[in-house]
Amino acid sequence: MCHSSKRFTARIRLLVFSLLLFLAASDLAYAAGVPDADSMMMVAVVAGLVLLIFVINAIFGAWVYKDAKHRGMKNPTGWTVVVLITGVPGLIGYMITRPKGNPEVSRQ
């Protein structure tokens, strides 16, 4: 694992940990009867969903970049950006348009 991917993983862990702390604090506030606890809980849930979508798109983007590079495509970065922005539809588009066959054969 390279240095930048370790940093990326550490940042994702920090984001997840922060979200879990916020969720725990909202749950405690809700249990204590704080008036705005419902809205705090909703913010935590929405933030969690946004974070989950971001992480899934980042995983898809990393896979697309590696696969496109192995298949010898001219612009792996372009497909990576498309997948990061569009998510699953971009991944499906990449899977349809990528060169067919074994990546090892495509490199030659």
Image: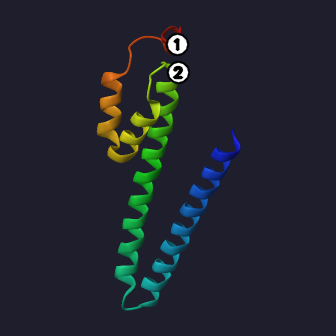
Residue 28 in percent (x, y) is at 50, 82
Residue on which disc 1 sits? 107
Residue 70: which numbered mark, if any?
2
Q: Are marks 1 and 2 in contact (CB under 8 Å)?
A: yes
Mark 2 falls on what kind of element? helix
Residue 20: x and y, percent?
53, 67
Residue at 41 percent across and 66 percent down: it is 47
Figure quadrant of residue 88: top left
Alpha-carbon neighbours of circle 1 within 10 Å: few (<14), some, or many (≥20)?
few
Residue 21 at x, y = what percent? Answer: 55, 72
Identified by mark 1, the residue type is Arg
Judged from this view, the residue extending furthest toward the front is 74
Q: Residue 86 versus residue 48: which sits nearer the camera? A: 86
Q: In what element is the residue under mark 1?
A: loop
Q: How many marks?
A: 2
Compared with 13, 68 (above or below) is above
- Quarter where residue 79 is shown: top left
Compared to 30, does 76 lie above or below?
A: above
Q: Residue at x 36, y 40 (%)?
A: 82
Q: Amino acid at mark 2?
A: His
The front one of 24 and 10 is 10
First in residue order: circle 1 vs circle 2: 2
Q: CA distance from mark 1 to mark 2?
A: 7 Å
Please give the name of the residue rendered at 37% of the width and 88% of the height, measured from the top-left corner. 36
